């Protein structure tokens, strides 16, 4: 896997002219300036990768990777980064999700585990997500079909361009969890610690593949999708996608308490679905869900040398605990520890990964036990 990803990275960084590359899409409209987080104003920017060749053999003349950072990069006497933290988001998300109170107010404040005064926190928007290049920028279904290998290679190039040649921590949630496994295998000496949250270190299969394929088929089989050339969002497809996302992400205990009657549940759903449709694009979602097809870190787990604390929650529909896969695979990681957070009314299903108070203590332990490697 390492050699393949490195080749992809080299292709992403290349600046050779390619006349057959798809023209660059128009950049998105500027986003509203971000409010300070833990007393520090986030900095937004983008790197531009030119003449990019994807693993699908498609090409793009210009690929924009947007990012948000907190704090200032520090270097040692040899010029290597010492305090960089890379945090990777989930499917259809963006780096901005980590600026929410349930994450940032628990981790980034003074004296907290990832204090933004003493760390340089990098929050990328992956290919196809946030303010990075994506189908909805104008190319629609002509946008290259990217996979996790392309995304991880672009993340690595972003970190390099920001001067983060070494990372104190690689952390990821959901899709970002999967990306963190790939980082740990491909560049094992470039990080001190790894914290994957809410995924499995195996290929997408079983029920996990089912719900993704359902969304893909639901979009492609909606006549209003028009092979990606719709002028208005295909409503039937997006309603179906919303339904699947809500089921896959919910905590059944908490939902039963909050929505104790049929009327309450119906009203909640009726409120959620239009908001979901208004905030998502069908092509972007189709590409994002399909991108997981090339993911399978299971062959190279023994290559990981950094300490790993791997966290799932027992109420996660997408990564159900009864599979026992996490407990089995973590034994192959030399310095790996697995934590299963019990389901309760205070957990959040698959989304437990973003409620940092539920696993903050595990992060503190990981940083402590990785200190001797620095």
Image: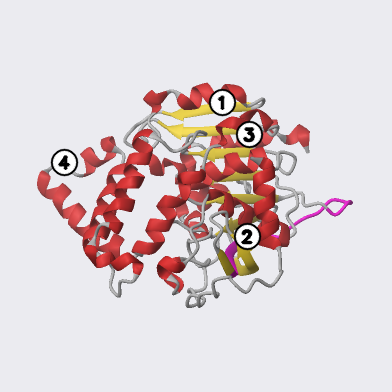
Question: Where's residue 238, x and y in %?
Answer: 27, 59
Disc 4 to disc 1: CB gap under 8 Å: no
Query: Which region is colored magenta?
Result: 61-79
Q: Residue at x 29, y 52 (%)?
A: 217
Q: Is residue 146 visible?
A: yes
Q: Which residue is mark 1?
A: 330
The residue lying toward the viewer, choosing from 270 and 165, is 165
In screen coordinates, is 374 left or right of 54?
right
Q: Which residue is mark 2?
A: 70
Secondary structure of the residue carrying tag 4 is loop
In this rendering, the label closer to the viewer, 2 or 1: 1
Which of the two discs, 2 and 1, labels the residue nearer the N terminus? 2
Disc 3 to disc 1: CB gap under 8 Å: no
Secondary structure of the residue carrying tag 3 is helix
Residue furthest to the front in view is 20
Q: Residues within 10 Å of mark 1 (few under 14, many from 20)?
A: many
Q: Which residue is mark 4?
A: 260
Which of the two discs, 4 and 1, labels the residue nearer the N terminus? 4
The residue lying toward the viewer, choosing from 182 and 342, is 182
Disc 3 to disc 2: CB gap under 8 Å: no
Whether residue 123 is situated above or below residue 308 in the rendered picture: below
Q: Residue at x 19, y 44 (%)?
A: 259
- Give the number of callouts: 4
Q: Which residue is mark 3?
A: 366
The residue lying toward the viewer, choosing from 33 and 292, is 292
In which quadrant of the rendered view does residue 303 lie? top right
Which of the two discs, 3 and 4, labels the residue nearer the N terminus? 4
Quadrant in the picture for the C terminus: top right
Q: Residues within 10 Å of mark 4 (few under 14, many from 20)?
A: few
Which of the two discs, 3 and 2, labels the residue nearer the N terminus? 2
Q: CA distance from mark 3 to mark 4?
A: 39 Å
Secondary structure of the residue carrying tag 1 is helix
């Amino acid at each position: 896997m390492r050699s393949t990803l490195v080749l992809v990275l080299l292709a992403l960084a290349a600046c050779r002219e390619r006349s057959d590359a798809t023209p660059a899409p128009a950049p998105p409209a500027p986003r509203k300036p971000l409010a300070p987080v833990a007393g520090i104003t986030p900095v937004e920017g983008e790197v531009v990768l030119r003449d990019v060749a994807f693993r699908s053999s498609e090409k793009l003349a210009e690929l924009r990777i947007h990012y948000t950072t907190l704090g200032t990069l520090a270097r040692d006497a040899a010029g290597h980064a010492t305090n960089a933290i890379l945090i990777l988001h989930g499917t259809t998300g963006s780096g901005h999700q980590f600026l929410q109170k349930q994450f940032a107010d628990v981790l980034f404040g003074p004296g907290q585990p990832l204090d933004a005064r003493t760390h340089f926190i990098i929050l990328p928007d992956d290919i196809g997500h946030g303010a990075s290049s994506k189908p909805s920028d104008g190319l629609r279904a002509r946008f290259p079909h990217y996979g996790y290998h392309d995304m991880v290679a672009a993340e690595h190039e972003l970190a390099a361009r920001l001067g983060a040649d070494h990372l104190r921590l690689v952390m990821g949630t959901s899709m970002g969890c999967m990306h963190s496994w790939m980082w740990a295998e491909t560049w094992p000496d470039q990080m001190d610690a790894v914290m994957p949250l809410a995924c499995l270190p195996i290929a997408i299969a079983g029920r996990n593949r089912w719900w993704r394929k359902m969304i893909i088929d639901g979009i492609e089989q909606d006549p209003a999708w028009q092979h990606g050339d719709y002028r208005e969002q295909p409503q039937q497809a997006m309603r179906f996608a919303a339904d699947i996302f809500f089921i896959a992400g919910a905590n059944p205990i908490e939902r039963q308490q909050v929505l104790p009657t049929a009327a309450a549940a119906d009203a909640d759903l009726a409120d959620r679905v239009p908001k979901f449709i208004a905030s998502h694009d069908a092509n972007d979602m189709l590409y994002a869900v399909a991108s997981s097809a090339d993911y399978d870190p299971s062959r190279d787990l023994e290559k990981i040398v950094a300490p790993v604390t791997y966290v799932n929650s027992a109420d996660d529909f997408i990564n159900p605990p009864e599979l026992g896969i996490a407990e089995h695979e973590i034994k192959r990681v030399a310095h790996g520890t697995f934590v299963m957070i019990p389901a309760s009314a205070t957990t959040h299903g698959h989304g437990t990964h973003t409620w940092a108070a539920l696993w903050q203590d595990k992060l503190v332990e990981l940083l402590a036990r990785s200190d001797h490697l620095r």
